[in-house]
Image (spheres, rainbow, N blue to C red):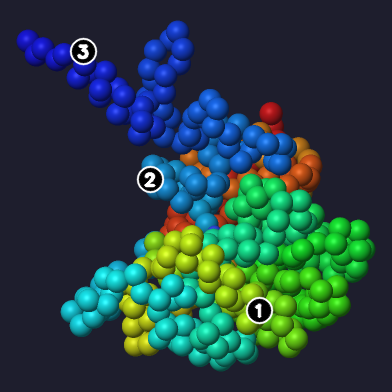
């Protein structure tokens, strides 16, 4: 007979609970947590959603939701369309191993230091050249390397905005930008959008009524809709923002993942008088764990943003910046981009054809020219809050539209599908499962 002390058992339970594997129910006992369940709320520790900023609590549906969970691996039997990243199967393991080895062999001393807090200069120089080729004027001295573009968003928000300020945002828009602004006490006011991006016609009235401190926009393959802001609207937006003296924050998180059509001019390239902060990242084009993003800012703002970056995280990993610079300069980045575009374009087509074939009547889908996401609009008898548990039952998941809205009843009839993250076979199977869940929802 094996004797284990009570203390050992208690310690083991404590450890499992701390890691989130167990949940205690008062008066009932300890339970193994459901693998898809959101983290338990800890009494007294408010979440960003407790302050009323988000009328829809994304943690209440019980099943999957997006933020913080969608990118963690789900059990293999679940087909995941919720993730916010590209396809892990093509992350460049071998090519990146080679450049890292070479950096460690030749520059380990420097690569192990903090390095320049504005970023490794040769990488800034490489980025300046890439951006200039795309018509985006940028000198290395205007580029600040950040820990992913999320840090760039956070630095801009902390540097330019004060509690009570207003930011105009597309509706719907990137969930973590909404939360970031809300946490800082910043009001977000939605700009209506259509298939050509944000409606510039609505801007003069919004600018006059709200006197915003910033306009945040994702002009290419927007998250979550996949839409692009049309060129005439880009020009109007830049002109209107300049006339009102409002800074534009241009988040170009997947701009290089274009599958057809010509690239559209960036807002920064159109704003000859300045006033646009441009943000980019390698998370979607390469891999998210590299945590390298960057911003391009004018001379007045740059030193303030750079100081914040220094105080926020000192630097971005020298080892990874040097490896990335080598990866780009030997041509591996271009090859990787081409590979990603070929695969994602095919997956987009597989998903779009399957959706056209299987979706029940009343659903609407727009075909994006690039990026990672397809946006679906659902008919009134298929609300997402009823669809989601049925989709889980069918072992498929997606991102609920409500994550991307601040407060809009339309959100209940929208969802985002990441078409890039699965094999063609699983993409097809996933859409069949989703269509089955929709049919069940409709029949209920
Ligand atoms: N902007 C948008 C629109 C995003 O979707 C994301 C991540 N999903 C980010 C910024 C931040 O990504 P990262 O920090 O990995 O660059």
Q: In the picture, residue 315 is in which quadrant?
A: bottom left
Nearer to the camera, 318 or 401: 318
The circle on residue 300 is: 1
Question: Closer to the N terminus: mark 2 or mark 1?
Answer: 2
**Which residue is drawn at the image coordinates 71% and 41% (left, top)?**
53
Residue 385, image x, y percentages = 66, 36
Is the C-beta separation of discs 3 and 2 under 8 Å?
no
Which of the four quarters of the rendered structure image does ligand 1 lie in? bottom right
**Mark 3 crowdedness (10 Å alpha carbons): few <14, some 14-19, many ≥20:** few
Quadrant housing the C terminus: top right
Q: Is residue 6 left or right of residue 274?
A: left
| Cα gap from disc 2 to disc 1, whole angstroms | 50 Å
**Which residue is drawn at the image coordinates 74% and 65% (left, top)?**
214
| Cα gap from disc 3 to disc 1, whole angstroms | 63 Å
Q: Nearer the viewer, mark 3 or mark 1?
A: 1
Is residue 409 placed above or below 129 in the rendered structure?
above
Mark 2: secondary structure: loop
Determine which residue is flagged by label 3: 6
The circle on residue 431 is: none
Is the C-beta separation of discs 2 and 1 under 8 Å?
no
**Which residue is drawn at the image coordinates 30% and 22% (left, top)?**
13
């Amino acid at each position: 007979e094996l004797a284990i002390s009570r203390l050992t058992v208690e310690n083991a339970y404590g450890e499992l609970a701390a890691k989130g594997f167990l949940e205690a129910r008062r008066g009932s006992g300890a339970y193994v947590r459901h693998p898809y369940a959101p983290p338990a709320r800890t009494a007294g520790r408010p979440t960003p959603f407790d302050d009323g900023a988000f009328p829809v609590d994304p943690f209440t549906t019980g099943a999957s939701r997006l933020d913080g969970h969608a990118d963690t691996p789900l059990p293999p039997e679940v087909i995941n369309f919720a993730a916010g990243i590209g396809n892990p199967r093509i992350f460049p393991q071998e090519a990146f191993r080679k450049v890292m080895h070479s950096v460690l062999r030749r520059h380990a001393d420097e690569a192990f230091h903090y390095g320049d807090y504005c970023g490794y200069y040769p990488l800034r120089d490489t980025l300046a050249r890439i951006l200039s080729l795309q018509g985006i004027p940028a000198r290395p001295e205007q580029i600040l390397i950040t820990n992913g573009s999320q840090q760039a968003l956070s630095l801009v928000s902390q540097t330019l905005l004060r509690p009570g300020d207003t930011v105009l945002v597309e509706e719907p828009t990137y969930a973590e930008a909404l939360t970031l602004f809300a946490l800082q006490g910043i009001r977000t006011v939605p700009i209506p959008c259509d298939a050509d991006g944000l409606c510039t016609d609505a801007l003069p009235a919004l600018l006059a009524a709200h006197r915003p401190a910033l306009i945040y926009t994702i002009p290419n393959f927007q998250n979550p809709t996949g839409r692009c802001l049309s060129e005439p609207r880009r020009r109007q937006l830049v002109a209107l923002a300049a006339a009102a003296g409002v800074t534009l924050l241009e988040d170009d998180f997947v701009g290089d993942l274009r599958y057809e059509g010509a690239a559209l001019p960036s807002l920064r390239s159109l704003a000859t008088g300045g006033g646009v902060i441009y943000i980019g990242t390698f998370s979607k084009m390469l891999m998210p764990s590299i945590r390298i993003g960057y911003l391009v800012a004018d001379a007045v703002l740059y030193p303030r943003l750079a100081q914040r970056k220094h105080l926020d995280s000192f630097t971005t990993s020298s080892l990874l910046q040097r490896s990335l610079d080598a990866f780009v300069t030997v041509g591996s980045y271009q090859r990787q981009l081409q590979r990603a575009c070929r695969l994602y374009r095919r997956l987009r087509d597989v998903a779009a054809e399957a959706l056209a074939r299987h979706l029940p009547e009343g659903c609407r889908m727009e075909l994006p020219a690039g990026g990672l996401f397809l946006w679906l609009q659902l008919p009134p008898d298929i609300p997402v809050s009823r669809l989601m548990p049925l989709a889980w039952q069918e072992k498929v998941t997606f991102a609920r539209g409500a994550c991307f809205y601040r407060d809009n009843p339309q959100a209940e009839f929208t969802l985002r599908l990441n078409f890039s993250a699965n094999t063609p076979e699983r993409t097809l199977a996933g859409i069949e499962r989703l269509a089955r869940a929709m049919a069940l929802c409709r029949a209920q």
